[in-house]
Amino acid sequence: MKQDLVSPDAFLSRLRAVEILLRFPAGTVTEDLNVLAGELDSTSATLANATAAVAYAAFAGLVRIAATLVQWHGAVLDAAPDTDRFLRSAKARYQLWLKEYEKQMAAASLVQASGTLPDVSSLDDAVKFLNAIGTVPLPLGMIAQDQPFARIHGPHLDEHPKTEARPLTVAFLKFQIDSVDAQYIHQLTPGEVHDLELEVRVSRWPEEHSELELTPISVEPPSTYEFPSFRFSRPDGDPPYILHHRARAILKSGARLARAAIRI
């Protein structure tokens, strides 16, 4: 049978992310939040309970959006050019995040706490948003560890505990542009064809869906680029699945690659 144990990775990654969110803008580095979001994404794939897995994946998505708001905050203070691109990116990514999680009970508290993002227009608004999502409690992260099955004496000797349906869980293992590892926001040269290579680990795939689609998006308007969609059919056998695909991308003008949107 499975014995559930507390995941130290989930606890530490979340604790560090919460500390940054609640203390912002004191001593925050954008890369810290992006790294922690990646750790939370990967950890969510190992959690035994579906509710906790969804909550941690949703929190990871908001932490990554928060990193973009941190960039906007810093760019405004530094009087950098075109600072609004970061705010536009955060709001566009939030809409994708909302479509994925707004109907999932496990993420209800995060949806409620993040609801002010579309109205963010000042630095104080951004600070309040980061502080708000940092205060949301999450389920205790537990990982399942195989243990010898303990036989139960009684009339239900051969029955096994029922397992609940688990939602899709995707962890990005590799995302390369022209054979170079891409950062969370990556500058591409316009007017050239670029190779995009994607590798993901799918640890939970809903039974009712047969295809997974991952679509890169940009901070800039869709008319400025042509990015491919990565489509994967559900492999044979049991998860986890390692999926890999390569495709081409073309930019019509300067654009920044932000992240991939997931659709099933």
Image: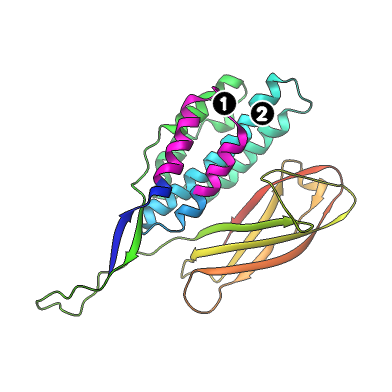
Neighbor class of circle 1 (other Cα within 10 Å; few <14, some 14-19, many 20+) is: many
Marks 1 and 2 close (CB-CB < 8 Å)? yes
Q: Which residues are magenta?
A: 11-39
Horizontal arrangement in the rendering, residue 143 relative to residue 117 (left or right)? left
Mainly helix, strand or loop, the magenta region? helix
Q: Nearer the viewer, residue 122 or 140?
A: 140
Q: Name the element at disc 1.
A: helix
Question: Which residue is drawn at the image coordinates 53% and 40% (left, top)?
Answer: 62
Disc 1 residue type?
Ala
Inspect the image, locate mark 2, and give the three-letter code of the amino acid beneath it: Trp
Distance from label 1 to label 2 (Cα)? 9 Å
The C terminus, quarter of image: bottom right
Q: Is residue 262 within the magenta segment?
A: no
Element type at mark 2: helix
Label annotation for residue 72:
2
Q: Residue 18: x percent and y percent?
A: 45, 34
Mark 1 lies on residue: 126
Query: Is 116 left or right of 177, judged from the image as shown?
Result: left
Residue 19 among those drawn in magenta: yes
Q: Position of residue 155 (x, y in %)?
A: 10, 78
x and y percentages locating residue 252 in the rendered image? 87, 48
Q: Is residue 49 left or right of residue 89?
A: left
